Image (cartoon, rainbow, N blue to C red):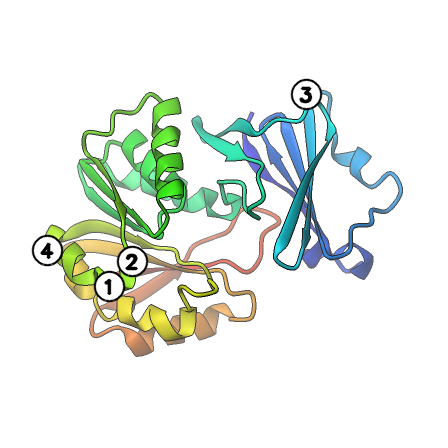
Amino acid sequence: MSSYRLFNGRMQSDLALNHITIDRYSSLILLTTYNNHKLPESFLSSFITPDIIKICWRKRTGSTTEFKFIKGDTVATFDTVENDLKYELRFEERQNIGLFLDMANIRDYVKKNISGKKLLNLFAYTCSFSVAAMAGGAAEVTNVDMKSTFLSWGRKNHQINGQATDNVKFLKHNILKSLGGYIKRGPFDLVIVDPPSYQPGGFKLKEDYPRILKKLDQLITTQGEALICSNDPLQSADNFKQFILENIKTGKVTKLFDLPSHFDGLKVFRYQL
């Protein structure tokens, strides 16, 4: 079993469904509704197969989130599988549960292209890229996030995969204030920049991203690359690419990575010297 999106209401012509997404995490279905928490009659039944043992309904209203299990016992955590790797999900007050499925193709790319190389994982969250990198034979991984809770969660993800972390670093840093330190730790063969689109009191994409983009040429090796990501649904791929080009000092920007089915909004470009 694996993890993938089953339904994205924003991609439907029926406006009555645009507040709904359905994701499958192994034998668990996560139903998410945004602001409007009504479901068409019998809507969910078409997505349920005999091997689904849990259904969790995540109701997101503004900045608040409620989790309710409508099939199977209520649990605080659940291990899912993606590309033969395990990740721990947590059903708590925070909006996100620990694994962003739109990044599945990028994790696969990292796993297949990191053998013997050094990875810098900025805005690491629960370190899913780090898990994929170690599975792919990375020589060293440096995970950076502002929250120690997420980094501890990332350690757990390595643990449940039986991965040693001798060559994995977990750094609780304000990334924007620490760029000089990462340059000294580098250069890196691969840098992943996957910030939140907007973080109250924290990262602001339009204002803060340029500070990172201007340092990319100092962070990667001559043959290295950076994967530059944006989840801002209001920014088109063309506009994001232009935004990158306006803020890098040198190098080239290529290839918009393909997204898994039923996803929209994410943009990922490759930067190389």
Q: Can the viewer see residue 273 in this picture? A: no
Position of 259 with respect to 35 (left or right) is left
Q: Say whether disc 4 or disc 2 marks the residue closer to the N-terminus.
A: 2
Residue 52 in the image: x percent, y percent?
A: 68, 24
User: Disc 1 residue type?
Assistant: Lys
Marks 2/3 in contact by CB < 8 Å: the verdict is no
Amino acid type at mark 3: Asp
Q: How many marks?
A: 4
The residue under label 3 is: 51
Per the image, the residue denoted by label 2 is: 174
Dividing the picture into quadrants, the one containing residue 205 is bottom left
Check contact, mark 3 vs mark 1: CB within 8 A: no
Q: Residue 178: x, y in percent?
A: 21, 59
Classify residue 10 as left or right of residue 175: right
- Is the residue marked by circle 3 packed among few (<14), some (14-19), or many (20+) residues within 10 Å? few
Alpha-carbon distance for marks 3 and 4?
49 Å
Q: Alpha-carbon distance for marks 4 and 2?
A: 16 Å
Give the residue pinned by disc 1: 177
Quadrant location, the N terminus: top right
State yes or no: discs 1 and 2 in contact (Cβ < 8 Å): yes
